Image (spheres, grey):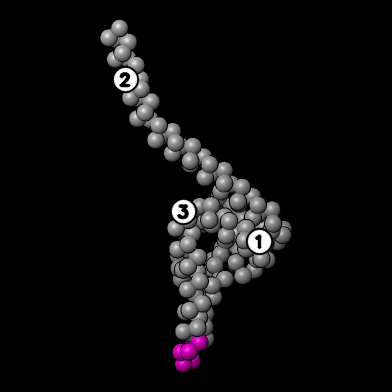
Amino acid sequence: MKLLRILTISLLFILLSHAPILAESASMQSAAVNMTQAVNNFIAALSPEQRAIAILPFTDKRTDWHFLPTDMYARPGIRLKDLTATQSLLAHAVISSGLSQEGYIKATTIMSLEEILHDLEEKMDNKIPVRDPSLYFV
């Protein structure tokens, strides 16, 4: 009887200690499903020409990215400004699916700050504005 009680308590302890891991795994699977669906919806909304620009092979330099202006570094992918309103919403759904709510708000806030920088550049002598909040790539 005492052995049965010890085994029961041990089993209960093991199950409870693994519950957070199981919950996190389910949450990660749900996030992966949401991201996959968002990407599939975005790709389906693109024209064949846009797909050729937006979809990069896994052999490409997908990790070679930085914040330098496009005239200094050619970026792969399709520009947000080249998307229709519907495609832009779907692109934002892709971005949102990979970030927390706070992360998405930060990302879109940073993007919107380009407008302020554009206005400041316009006021500078002999400076052509290069900032554009829709000059981000997907």
Q: Which residues are magenta?
A: 122-127
What amino acid is labelled 1 in the image? Gln
Q: Residue furthest top?
A: 1
Residue 121 image position (x, y, % from top left) = 48, 84
Residue 105 image position (x, y, % from top left) = 48, 62
Residue 47 image position (x, y, % from top left) = 72, 59
At a point 60% along the width and 51% down the height, the residue shown is: 38
Q: Residue furthest left?
A: 2
Per the rendering, the mark at residue 100 is 3
Q: Answer with the quarter of the image where residue 79 lies.
A: bottom right
What secondary structure is the stretch in magenta mostly built from? loop
Q: Rate crowding at label 1 as few (under 14), some (14 to 19) or many (20 or more) other CA atoms within 10 Å.
A: some
Please tell me whether residue 126 belongs to the stretch shown in magenta: yes
Pointer 1 residue: 87
Pointer 2 residue: 10
Q: Determine the secondary structure under disc 3.
A: loop
Residue sitting nearer the eye, 4 or 83: 4
Q: Earlier in the sequence, mark 1 or mark 3?
A: 1
